[in-house]
Image (cartoon, helix red, strand yellow):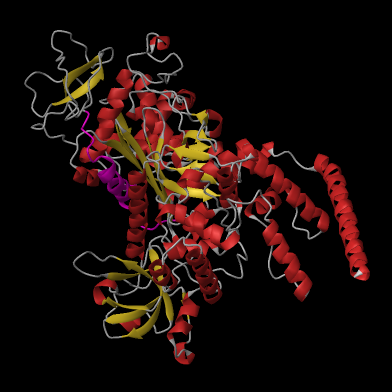
Amino acid sequence: MKLLTKILKLGFWALFITGFFGVVGAIVTFFYLDPKLPSIDNLKHVQFQVPLRVFSRDAKLIAEFGEKRRIPLDYQALPPQLIQAFLAAEDNRFFEHPGVDYQGILRAIVQLVLTGEKKQGGSTITMQVARNFFLSREKTYIRKLNEILLALKIESELSKEKILELYLNKIYLGHRAYGVGAAAQVYYGKKIEELDLAQMAMVAGLPKAPSAYNPVTDPARALERRNYVLGQMRRLSYITEEQFQSASSAPVTARIHSANLEVEAPYVAEMVRAELFERYGENAYTDGFTVYTTIDSRLQSAANRALRSALQAYDLRHGYRGAEAHFDLTQVSEERDLELLLKEYGKVADLLPAIVTKVEERSIEVFLGNGQRATIEWEGLKWAQKYKSEDYRGAAPKRADEVVNIGDLVRVLDQSTAEKRSLRLAQIPAVEGALVSLDPNDGALIALIGGYDFFNSKFNRVTQAQRQAGSGFKAFIYSAALEAGFTPASLINDAPIVFNDPSLEGTWRPENYSGEFFGPTRLRYALTKSRNLVSIRLLRSMGISHALSHAEHFGFDPNALPHNLSLALGSAAVTPLQMATAYAVLANGGYRISQYLIERIEDNQGVAVYRANPARVCENCESDPSEGDDKEETFAPRVISAQNHYLMNSMMQDVIRRGTATKARVLGRDDLAGKTGTTNDQKDAWFNGFNRSNVAIAWVGFDSAKPLGRGEVGGTAALPAWIDYMKEALKGVAEKPLVMPPGIVTVRIDPNTGKRAGPDQAGSIFEVFRDDNAPEMDQQRLSRTTRSGGTNGLPVKDEDPF
């Protein structure tokens, strides 16, 4: 008995001394470690690494940039069932313990003592928050003690709800997804509130091992982990038996979803990314900036379709260049082998990769991937005459085997309608193009596509392609001529001319596109028909220096333009964006605006850190711009007179009515104007067109600057893209007639001489002039009729003899 008492006393003192020194050690450890712990205040104002997001003007997602995909959510936005799933998987006593679960730690110690292995963790959600925000991943006792102390401090300063919010937004859940908001999008393409119970349990099972239990890379293990989480939820009475059975029997539906892009505008996205990187450096990708652009999502889609359609049409006119690749299918016995072969070839714009698996007399069968096979009928094959050069094609095929062979890797364009499936053999166009559209009132870019497919070629031809402007530059030459005293009725001789100009490297013999000469020609008609020799003589007459100075009003740098007569034919190298900005002056009444793309930039709290303030056209503000309603608003300066603007629009509307762009009459509008552009050897094809609300520039050409081929002028290669785009852009937009400003008069003239006609002269026509240079000025006989511009002062009953 005495021995037992002695043993008990010894045990008591041993426990007391151990406990005493344990408490002393804990206190010493606390006072040693506590000063070194980071401040919890940082958690009260956490700025998560959130990617840069780019939106259209109408708030549709264009792009997302950043290594980490994260969608931060407030606690109130987290579905209760999702919270329960995480508690069941990670810390079911979260709302009961003070940040450290002593029961869990004791269980972990017992497991360690009994088995020698750490089979059951003692980390709480709060401890994980401490580790994820403040500590490294090293496994040391000091780090564990720091983790415990930090967890206790966090619990003393933050609410349980705030801790959960931090945790569920911070944790890594695989495939670049950080936080549950991103995980819902990455694995299911949904918002977090749209997930069902099985999907929530799957996401909740990921923190333990995002790679090992990943539903995409290892569905079997992920399914096991998901059902464990569901079982825990049932045990904790979070869900019913019926819910458990239903969710645990659900199939694994996860797959990788890219960001849910709503607008296809990768060239725009790259322009914004570069601008943000220039402003903010690497922080642009992590600080959660949201950029709203000036892009109209509807018109961006229209621009994509219009340009691609024009480039495909060019391809159809020039023949089939052959298969992209060829595979020997004699050793291919299973469909999965075809899948592997096709895997290397992605979609390019709207063109699908396909492998020819069968060739009939007038049809072929193709394998499209994902187990899909389809037939291309003769209607989709017969176009494929063999390409020989830009000017020559082979004979029309009579059989399908003259076009393709079994094993060919080809491209397919799906032209199906609701009533009928229709596929066409296609190819990635070798020719390239660009289309840009802006609002002439302030320079806002409305739509922009810099090539057939960004991922096939990232070169942005809207902003980077320096190409000769061709006859599109004549608009600025003619505007300069009007300022120099010429009129739409001035006669210039369209006749052969030879120059010995050292700056042109020898003798220069310019010609009209047709190779013909037409004698004395009025300026209106010369511009309408794009007569080269008239433009050259006009430039020589007014002087190159005058033309260069006038071109500066449209935004061109005179030092970057040719200082010789080739300027009249558009030998200047310009970008489509420069042309759009310049043509805006002709569209908006004569005011110089600057293009811009970014409407505003918001930080991760939704506060605007930048807002565009472009100079805007204000036709009634010329007398005193400071009299605007908004004192901070800036107004675009007038750079050409209202009279110059009216006369130029009057002549350029005729380009569409009766000139080189008559195809555009299909739009059925009277307020359109523009100018085709074609360079030497048809290396560049342009159409530059506008009305009062929209300027659009279309360009087509090879990046190598080789010729497009015979007949591939601006009105053939580029104008169709402009028409298709404007067809959509002008929907619901009322016509705005050209209004004659003060200082313009209408005079009846003799079309052969450009002089004022007698009152009864047969064949005479009406023309418009500035009142200070009308022919044979006679105030009693001038007709000062204010016209709406419907026929540019030319009565319908009078035929233009030219």
106 or 694: nearer the viewer? 106
Q: Position of residue 116 (x, y in %)?
A: 78, 74
Classify 661 as above or below 336. above
Residue 784 in the figure: left or right of residue 170: left
Q: Which residues are magenta?
A: 707-736
| Quarter where residue 802 is shown | top left
Q: Which residue is painted at 38% across and 27% down in the image?
A: 585
Q: Is 336 or 467 nearer to us in this picture?
A: 336
Q: Residue at x 93, y 65 (%)?
A: 6
Residue 703 relative to residue 471: left or right? right
Given residues 99 and 385, the one toward you in this image is 99
Farthest front residue in view: 1
In the rendered view, tell whether residue 418 sits above or below residue 509: below
Q: Quadrant of the N terminus?
A: bottom right
Residue pictured at 81% horizontal, 42% vertical: 34
- Where is residue 137 shown, x and y percent of the image? 74, 57
Indicate whether residue 141 is drawn in magenta.
no
Q: Where's residue 109, x and y in %? A: 75, 65
